[in-house]
Amino acid sequence: MTITKKQEGTKLTIAIKGELNTNTAPELEKEFETCLDGITSLVIDAQKMDYISSMGLRALFGAAEIMQGNGDICVINANDDVRNVFEVTGFVDIIAIK
């Protein structure tokens, strides 16, 4: 997995390339712990995300908890397989999937 960050003011876009799974989710969680101070809009660009596991969902849920009360979070550009995981798990009720 590769993580690319782009900040514009208080908006942070994190692009994820590869698989967000049990092995890679802790790396993303560490990013969230260190880079969300002062962020009011968090965008997860999933255009190049091939797969997401339950641990990946957990990492995104942790980011949603951090952002709660501070701003918003959304996932953009998810492919059909990743979008299906969000829908089947009910994650679409927690984070906006655009």
Image (cartoon, grey):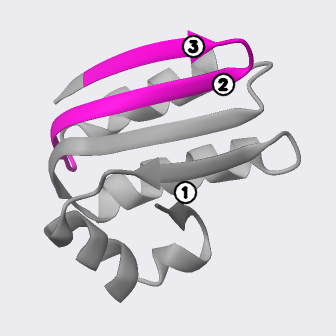
Nearer to the camera, 59 or 3: 3
The front one of 18 and 7 is 7
Local secondary structure at mark 3: strand
Question: Residue 7's mark?
Answer: 3
Please tell me which residue is depicted at 69% across the width and 35% down the height of the picture.
Answer: 41
Numbered range of the magenta stretch: 3-22
Q: Secondary structure at mark 2?
A: strand
Q: Give amino acid for label 2.
A: Lys
> Residue type at mark 1?
Phe
Image quarter where the N terminus lies is top left
Query: Which mark, by number, is residue 98?
Result: none
- Magenta region includes residue 18: yes
Magenta stretch: dominant secondary structure = strand
Position of 3 with respect to 19 (left or right) is right
Q: Can you give x and y, in whole percent of width and height, for residue 67 in the image?
A: 73, 43
Residue 64 in the image, given as x and y percentages of width and height: 64, 51
Residue 6 against residue 44 in the figure, above or below: above
Q: How many marks?
A: 3
Q: Earlier in the sequence, mark 2 or mark 1?
A: 2
According to the picture, the residue beneath numbered tag 2 turns out to be 11
Residue 54 magenta-drawn?
no
